[in-house]
Every structure is written in C-alpha cells, then in structure tokens.
Image (tube, rainbow, N blue to C red):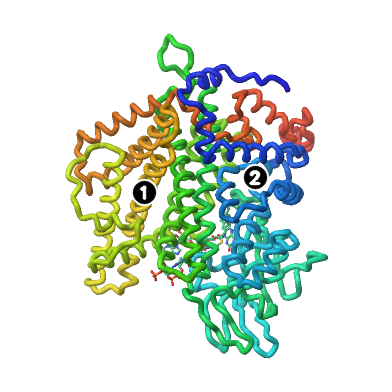
C-alpha cells in the first residue's frame, strides 16, 4: 500500500491529542464490535469500484445525475443486502445503523430509494394489517416493488385536514376511487415519485356512505410493473431542480378517478368493510405514525451530517495558515484564532449532543411503539411532542453549524469540492420536511399548555415535562452544568407561564381561543424551543454520565468538556432569558464567559482528535478540504482540473462571441 504523507500540521495536531481516538470511536459506535462491524461494511461497499463516480456529479446534467444515482442505488442496495444480518430485529438493525454514513460515499445529494426505505416500508409496517404486511412487506423488502410516501400536495403540506385528494368508496365494485379535483390537489414533493417508484402510500381523505372519514393511507400502484408506464388515470412527473436533494427524484402525482380495490386501504387502524361501513381506529392520530418515526430518525441524521461538516472544517483549520497573531511569528493555523474555535467547537459538541439524544429518543420510540402495538396509547402524546421538538432543534442547529463550518473555511468552503455546500443542501430541508419547524413547535406548545393545565389540576405530568411542576426557586447560581440545566428548565417554565398568561389575557379581552392562540404564538413557540433546549442539555449530560463512566480518564475529561461547552454556549446565547428567569448576576455572566474561553483553550489540543474520533472516511467526507491527510491545496487543484472547461485551452465561445465582441464585430 502507498504510504500516506500527512500534512505536518495535522500530524502534530494528532500527536498532541490527549485521549485515545480509537476509544472515542468505540464509544460513539457503542462498543468495539460495532466499530469493527461498521468498518467491515464500509470496506465492502467501498471496494465496489462501480459505486464510485468517474466524473464528479456536479458536472453531470440533471438527467444524467438521476440516471447515475439510479445505477448506483441498485448496486448499493445489493451490496448492502449481502451484508445484512437476518437475525437482527428491525429495532436493532436501525439502532446499529445509526453511525453508518456510508450512503454519503455513494450519493452526494441522497438516493432516489430513500423514501422507499425511510417511509414506504415503515408506512406498511405501521399502517398495514397483518395480511397487508405479509403481502406488501415481502414485495417491498425484496425490492419487487419500489414505493414512496405521497402526502403533501401542491396546495397543502402542513394542514393535513386540508388535503384535497379524495378516496371515495364504491360498495358496488368494492373499490376506492382516487381523485385530484384541482391542480392544488396534486401530490407534490414525494421522493422517488417522479420516475423511480411504481407504488406509493397515498394519504387521502376517505369518503364512504357520503361521510368524510378523515385522512387514511392507501397503497396505490402508479406504474405498470413491466413497462413502468404510468397507469391510466394517473399523471406523474418530476417537480424540477432544487437547492439540494436533486437525485432524490421528487415528483408530482394527480389522479383522474383512478380505481383501486378495497384491500388497498391500509387498515391497521381504521377499516372500511365491504358494504362501506367505516370503523375508526383507537386514535385517529395513529395514522400520522410514519411521520413520528421519521422525525425520530432525523435527529440522528442531523448529528451525522454535522459531524461530517465539522470534521472538514476542523481539519482544514489545522492546515490553513492565515494572517498574523504576532508580527514576529509565522502565519498561525487558523484554528489558533479563538473566534475560529468559537465557531467550530460548538459544532463538535452539538453533534455529540444530538447523537446521544437520538439514541435516547430511538429507545423511547421503540418502547412506546411496543405499547401502542399492545393497545396502550397513554404515552403517544408525549412521544409526538418529543419527536417534534427534537426534530426541530436538531435541524435548526445542524443547519446553523453546517453553514458556520462552511463559512469557517473562507472562500474554499464555497467550492462544491469542499462538499460543504451540498452538506448544507442536505440539512436545511429538514427544517421543512416532516413538518415545518414553526408548525411543529406549535404542536409542542400545545402539549405544554395542556401539561400546564394538568399541573394546575394537580395531575401527574409526562416525565419529560415533570420539571414544570417544580415550584422551588433556583436560589443561587452555581455555574455547574447541573445548575445550568435547572436554570434552562426555569426558563422554559417561566416562558410557558408567560405565554399561557398572555393566551388567557387575550381571551379575556374578547378574542376567540384561536385568535388568542395566534396572537400568543411567538411566545408559545419560544417556550417550546426553551423546553427543547432544556431536554437536550439534560439528556446530553445524563446519557454521557451514564455511558461514559467506564471510559479512560482522559477521554472522560474530553467528553465532559464537550458537555460543559455545549451547556455554556447555550447559556451565553440565551443570557436574556436566564437574566429574566434565574438568579444570574453580572458577575456570574463574566464567570461563565471566562469559563467558556477556558474550555475553548482546553479543547484546542484535542480538536483534530475529536473529529478523527467521528471516524468518517475520506470517501464519505468527499471533501478536498477535509481529507485525513490534509493535502488541501493539492486536492483543490486536482478537483479544479476535473472541470470540463479545463479540457481545452480555448473554449469555442471565444471565437463565436468574445472575439467578435471585443473586435467590435458583434
Ligand atoms: C436499515 C434501515 C435503516 C433506516 C434508517 C436510515 C436512514 C435515516 C435517514 C433519516 C432521514 C433522512 C431522510 C428523510 C427524508 C424525508 C423526506 C420527507 C418526507 C415528508 O416530508 S412526508 C410529509 C410530512 N408532512 C408533515 O409532517 C405534515 C405536518 N403536519 C402535521 O403533522 C399535522 O397536520 C399537524 C400536527 C400540524 C396538525 O394536524 P391536524 O390539523 O390533523 O391536527 P389537529 O390540530 O386536528 O390535532 C392536533 C392533535 O393531534 C395530535 N397529534 C398531531 N400529530 C400527531 C402525531 N403524529 N401523533 C400523535 N398525536 C398527534 C396533537 O398533539 C393534538 O392533540 P390534542 O390532544 O388535541 O392536543
Ligand atoms: C426536500 C423535501 C422532501 C420532501 N419529501 C416529501 C415526501 O417524500 N413526501 C411528502 O408527502 N412530502 C414531502 N415533502 C413536503 C414537506 O413535508 C412539506 O414541505 C412540509 O410538510 C411543509 O409544508 P408546506 O411546504 O406546505 O409549507 P407551509 O405549511 O405552506 O409553510 C409555509 C409557511 O407557513 C407557516 N405556517 C403554515 N401553517 C402554519 C400554522 N398553522 N401556524 C403558523 N405558521 C404556519 C410555516 O411556518 C411556514 O413559515 C418534502 C419537502 C422537501 C423540502
């Protein structure tokens, strides 16, 4: 094997690291065996050279990008399948794949099969009855059919009760008639819908016996299984180029009185009998279960994407030298600027915070799902609220810190060869899809207001909201992580109390409940956001304490520093709130600022080790700036030379336009 020459600054950073990087990787993976398994899988996938792109994706046309993505998706699926352990339960398979980012090595802009895996199959699992699961899951898991999740319409994404697609039951033929009565009723957005899927789960308003029975899921064939032509009564297409996700093949779909058999309604929850009698499910919101599942997964996806961005930016910052700190010294590594540390170390800590929170949430999700399967619905509202609030916070923070990582790389961060712009293109839509963030914060606020009322009535609160009942004053600011967590809880409680008071005040002033809610909604969403912050810092701290107790002292110390940095960063970001709702004084603020700066200094020698610990291979990072060897400038040039414009010294446009133009002949 050729010897890798590592940039000397990166090499000396690695020599400075105070903990064992491999131990950190094992900790993140959940054990040495999991690291080994993940690496084996990566080795196997990366050994398939047909999965690599010969020409960088960015130089392909829109159509070529899609065709190339499909070519790779099929091959990638086969390789993955050959590595699958059939003895794992679905829960374990997903938990064990939490640290896997190998998909990014194959697709810079995501796979056209994503929705099949992430929503179509889960929708069948969550919404299909036993026979439907038996039949459809087998076909879907074997890739005999490819599906997507078609819910959003051109006219409505958030407001599901406003969907216009109808499914009207016809007892004479025992069929549902699917129809899009208007342009705005067209399904719009589903991934893979345009040219990839031949089936989809369609969410439509069910009418039977002339009654609106709410939104229900239907499994609908949209293309012929042999010719792949759209079926009669179905209009399909692609929605066009986007900021990112360009190889996901998002599509549109319209129905012209398209008929499907009765057994195509997924009937795990609600049912329609042959004569058209509707039987409602135990809770109509169980129909929204697929969204809860994906919101839970998004938290982890955000942690992984952020780890990628911050790995690139930290390694680049160790290699890049710019300006002068002291006139007599050589140009320093930009990582030595404390402002650069301030920009980037929080990204490392945030990725850790959300990967711990994501695992905690996944286990909670699995527990509540098994309760739901046993008919126990009590914990569904709390799960919905938690999934909404953690999806919101993780997507907002990831977008901010990925963009900050890009900016921290100066001009080179703007290059597609840095892979930072594309990474931003992957994180930013998460603030919109699976429930637009403001809308989801309003759902969280709704659950908090309910909890507040329950508390006033002396009722017990769900565990994640129990702190609201803690009436005790926070007498003294002690600056400890646990003290700050309590302060965050006080902030959330105080903001909730304030917004509930406003909500009630507006109603007393004569506004309807809905108008009062709308008027109070800025405060309500702020309270929901604070509630989320309190949960994330607490989960980050308690889960790190729980899992890291057996680690070596140097690694334990490094992780504690990340937890403290994260807590202090948000305390300093939310000073106004803390000054309002906690006994924080000016001196305490100065102490916090000093401690934060001290932490930046302590983390500095470990910065490269911390991102090396994420163990994201070069093929996955896909970045000229972030490769392990730090050959930043050589790689930037190598990538530049791949531009098709560099294939010839003079471009034909010179003779056609420029020359006649410059010579006054055009
Ligand atoms: C080996 C396998 C590996 C797998 C893993 C691999 C990789 C992981 C990759 C991770 C992911 C990355 C890729 C992701 C791709 C995503 C692509 C995007 C897809 C989509 O966007 S699909 C469409 C999503 N759409 C939405 O989210 C719409 C948002 N709107 C809503 O959810 C709702 O309409 C609403 C909640 C805003 C309001 O609904 P509605 O008007 O019907 O509600 P009401 O006001 O009548 O009632 C509110 C009460 O209902 C409760 N409620 C609401 N939702 C739920 C729920 N989901 N569950 C439980 N309860 C719910 C509220 O709490 C209210 O209750 P209350 O008691 O009345 O207060
Ligand atoms: C990359 C990508 C992939 C997607 N994939 C899929 C898919 O596979 N399947 C699918 O079905 N959908 C998919 N979607 C659609 C996505 O779920 C919707 O875009 C999302 O739910 C938001 O709905 P909307 O676009 O209608 O936004 P809108 O609801 O129109 O939001 C616009 C603005 O109005 C505000 N707003 C709306 N309602 C309220 C309210 N009640 N109170 C206060 N403010 C409000 C919002 O906060 C926002 O600022 C995808 C979207 C993207 C970007």
- Is 649 located above or below residue 68 in the figure? above
Mark-to-mark CA distance, 2 and 1: 30 Å
- On the image, the x and y values in percent for residue 245 come to 62, 50
Quadrant in which residue 202 is drawn: bottom right
- Is 10 located above or below residue 406 in the figure? above
- Is 368 located above or below residue 12 in the figure? below
CB of mark 2 near ligand 1 (< 8 Å): yes
Secondary structure beneath dot 1 equals helix
Residue most extreme to the right? 227
- On the image, the x and y values in percent for residue 305 come to 54, 42
Number of residues whose C-alpha sits closer than 10 Å to that of mark 2, classed few (under 14), some (14–19) or many (20 or more) = some
CB of mark 1 near ligand 2 (< 8 Å): no
What residue does disc 1 label? 533
Q: Quadrant of the N terminus?
A: top right
Q: Is residue 496 left or right of 311 when viewed as pictured?
A: left
Instruction: Pick whichever, 321 or 263, lies toward us.
Output: 263
Secondary structure beneath dot 2 equals helix
* Residue 406 visible (yes or no): no
Instruction: Pick whichever, 343 or 382, lies toward us.
Output: 382
Number of residues whose C-alpha sits closer than 10 Å to that of mark 1, classed few (under 14), some (14–19) or many (20 or more) = many
- Is 440 located above or below residue 172 in the figure? above
Q: Is residue 177 left or right of 207 when viewed as pictured?
A: right
């Amino acid at each position: 094997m050729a010897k890798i020459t590592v940039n000397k600054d990166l090499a000396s950073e690695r020599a400075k690291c105070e903990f064992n990087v491999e131990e950190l990787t094992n900790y993140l993976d959940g054990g040495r065996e999991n690291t080994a398994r993940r690496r084996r899988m990566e080795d196997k996938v990366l050994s398939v050279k047909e999965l690599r792109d010969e020409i960088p994706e960015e130089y392909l046309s829109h159509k070529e990008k899609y065709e190339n993505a499909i070519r790779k998706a099929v091959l990638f699926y086969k390789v993955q399948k050959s590595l699958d352990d059939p003895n794992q339960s679905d829960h374990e398979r997903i938990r064990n794949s939490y640290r896997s980012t190998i998909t990014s090595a194959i697709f810079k802009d995501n796979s056209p099969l994503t929705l099949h895996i992430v929503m179509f199959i889960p929708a069948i699992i969550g919404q299909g009855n036993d026979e439907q699961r038996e039949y459809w899951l087998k076909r879907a898991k074997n890739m005999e059919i490819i599906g997507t999740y078609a819910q959003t319409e051109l006219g409505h994404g958030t407001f599901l009760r406003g969907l216009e697609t109808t499914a009207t039951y016809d007892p004479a033929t025992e069929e549902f008639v699917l129809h899009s009565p208007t342009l705005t009723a067209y399904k719009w957005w589903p991934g893979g819908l345009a040219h990839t899927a031949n089936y989809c789960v369609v969410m439509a308003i069910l009418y039977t016996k002339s009654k609106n029975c709410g939104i229900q899921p239907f499994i609908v064939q949209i293309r012929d299984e042999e010719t792949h032509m759209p079926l009669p009564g179905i209009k399909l297409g692609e929605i066009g180029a986007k900021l990112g996700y360009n190889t996901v093949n998002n599509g549109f779909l319209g129905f012209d009185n398209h008929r499907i058999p009765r057994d195509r309604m997924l009937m795990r929850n609600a049912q329609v009998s042959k004569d058209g009698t509707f039987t409602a499910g135990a809770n109509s919101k169980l129909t929204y279960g697929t969204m809860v599942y994906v919101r839970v997964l998004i938290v982890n996806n955000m942690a992984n994407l952020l780890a990628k961005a911050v790995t690139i930016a930290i390694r680049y910052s160790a290699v890049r030298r710019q300006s002068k700190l002291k006139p007599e010294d050589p140009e320093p590594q930009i990582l030595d600027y404390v402002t650069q540390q301030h920009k980037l170390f929080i990204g490392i800590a945030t990725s850790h915070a959300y990967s711990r929170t994501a695992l905690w949430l996944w286990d909670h999700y699995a527990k509540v799902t098994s309760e739901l399967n046993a008919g126990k619905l009590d914990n569904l509202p709390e799960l919905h609220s938690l999934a909404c609030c953690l999806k919101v916070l993780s997507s907002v923070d990831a977008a901010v810190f990925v963009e900050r990582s890009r900016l921290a790389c100066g001009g080179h961060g703007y290059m597609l060869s840095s892979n930072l712009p594309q990474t931003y293109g992957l994180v930013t839509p998460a603030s919109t899809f699976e429930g637009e963030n403001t809308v989801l914060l309003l759902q969280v606020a709704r659950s908090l207001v309910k909890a507040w009322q329950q508390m006033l009535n002396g009722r017990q609160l769900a565990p994640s909201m129990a702190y609201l009942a803690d009436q005790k004053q926070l007498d003294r600011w002690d600056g400890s992580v646990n003290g700050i967590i309590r302060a965050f809880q006080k902030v959330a409680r105080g903001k909730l109390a304030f917004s509930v008071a406003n909500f009630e005040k507006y109603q007393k002033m004569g506004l309807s409940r809905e108008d009062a809610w709308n008027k109070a909604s800025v405060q309500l969403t702020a309270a929901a956001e604070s509630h989320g912050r309190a949960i994330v810092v607490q989960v980050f701290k308690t889960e790190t304490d729980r899992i890291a107790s057996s680690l070596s002292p140097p690694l334990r110390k490094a992780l504690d520093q990340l937890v403290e940095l994260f807590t202090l960063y948000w305390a300093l970001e939310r000073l106004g709130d803390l000054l309002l709702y906690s006994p924080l004084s000016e001196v305490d603020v100065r102490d916090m600022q000093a401690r934060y700066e001290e932490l930046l200094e302590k983390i500095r020698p470990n910065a490269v080790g911390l991102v090396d610990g994420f163990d994201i291979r070069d093929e996955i990072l896909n970045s000229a700036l972030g490769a392990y060897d730090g050959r930043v400038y050589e790689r930037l040039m190598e990538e530049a030379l791949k531009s098709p414009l560099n294939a010839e010294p003079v471009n034909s446009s010179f003779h056609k336009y420029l020359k006649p133009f410059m010579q006054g002949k055009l």
